[in-house]
Image: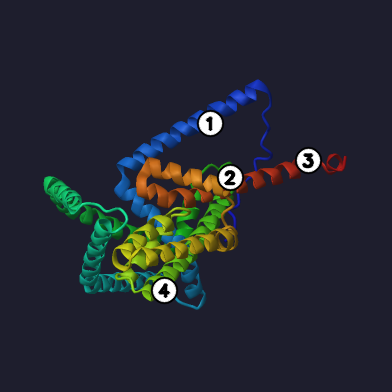
Amino acid sequence: MDEVDATDPGPVPTRTGLRGTALTCAELLVVGLFVYVVARLAERLLIVVVPFGVAVLVSALLRPAVLWLRRQGLPPALATWITVLAVWTLFGLLAWGVTVRSTAEMPKLITEATNTLGDLRDYLVNGPLHLQPDQIDKYTLDAQNYLKDHQAQLTKGVISGAGILFEVLTGAILSFFVGFFLLYDGEAIFGWVTRQLPAQARVPFDRAGRSAWRALAGYVRGTLIVALFHGVAMGIALTVMGVPLALPLAVLVAIGSLVPLAGALVAGGLAVLVTLATQGPLVALILVGVLVAENQAEAHILQPFVVGRYVHLHPLAIALVLTSGTVLAGLWGAVFAVPFTAATWAAVVALRQLRAERESAAVPPELSRT
């Protein structure tokens, strides 16, 4: 993609002294206020912002496939439709497989969990703890009474799930259309936005935007590879161990891996609990070892060589960004915080390079040799 032609305004003057520091601080305050207003607006328009963010991430992942089909001679619209429909078909088949396996294996899960709980009760009574059966029955009765007392809240949560389903469907439809047009006409949209800017801002915006897009696309592709690694490894481990719901749990771990650092561990914790309830503590402990080995492989092999080629963020920065995003925006903040921070940082680096090029070009040759 060629850069947009525009008049070069020349090198940007540097600021020194107290006045320059004050001007910089004032600009930072204005930027911070702008970011705060945008964040509050995004919070009110969450049903629009989240599908748009998902569409951007998916478009960054699928655009190479669309470009490849177009290079094979397919029209842009047909190449886009083939790519989008193929992805949605794959997603639908995966969802169907998870649903079928969950329905088929849920009775087995309940039976094995009941047997394991019975074995646990016998261990607590006859084992080294020597608990009284009356104590265990009391704890069980307390748990049942708690569920009865909060039955109204649980029912309310189930009823509200219909509204959540409507929002999910609305978001999915919006994300589909946004992603389709980003894949089909993204270059023209970006060019139109660039042309609306003042002439002196077009080259920086073009350079920063393309650098951010490359970083975002690289991050999404690398994170998908990491997620597939965790999902396949967990699926094999659960299948070998004979744990019910192996496919749904493996898919859950893969989805959780889309959140860096903690996602695979949190989703893997549920798999460990299911394994503990159905196969006992020894098999669950082995699964914990598998999770630790997976995360070590991700930290020392996949993240540096797959994701690290595109995302130049220190692990400490990723942890802080991830935590901040989770605190401010919950689950979606955890999903979007790192990729969009990586894209923003790539844009900043590109602007610095552009500024250095302009300053270097503005220095006379006789001065540059002294």
Residue pointed to by mark 1: 28
- Disc 4 residue type? Ile
Residue 234 in the image, given as x and y percentages of width and height? 41, 68
**In the rendered structure, are the residues bearing label 2 and label 3 in contact, judged by CB atoms less than 8 Å apart?**
no
Specify the farthest residue to the bottom: 72
Residue type of the residue flagged with mark 3? Val
Foreground tag (3 vs 4): 4
Badge 4 local density, few (<14 within 10 Å), some, or many (20+)?
some
Closer to us: 243 or 39:
243
Image: 129 above or below 240: above
Q: CA distance from mark 4 to mark 1?
A: 50 Å
**Quadrant housing the C terminus:** top right
Mark 1 lies on a secondary structure that is helix
| Residue at position x 30%, y 41% in the image | 44
Can you tell which of label 4 and label 1 is closer to the viewer?
4
Q: How far apart, in angstroms, are the residues tagged by discs 1 and 2? A: 15 Å
Q: Is residue 182 left or right of residue 121?
A: right
- Residue that mark 2 sits on: 348
Q: Which residue is mark 3?
A: 363
The residue carrying mark 4 is 236
Badge count: 4
- Rate crowding at label 1 as few (under 14), some (14 to 19) or many (20 or more) other CA atoms within 10 Å: few
Q: Please indicate, yes or no, whether residue 62 appears anywhere in the rendered image.
A: no
> What residue is at 39 percent from the left and 53 percent from the top?
53
Does residue 315 appear anywhere in the picture? Answer: yes
108 horizontally vs 89: left or right: left
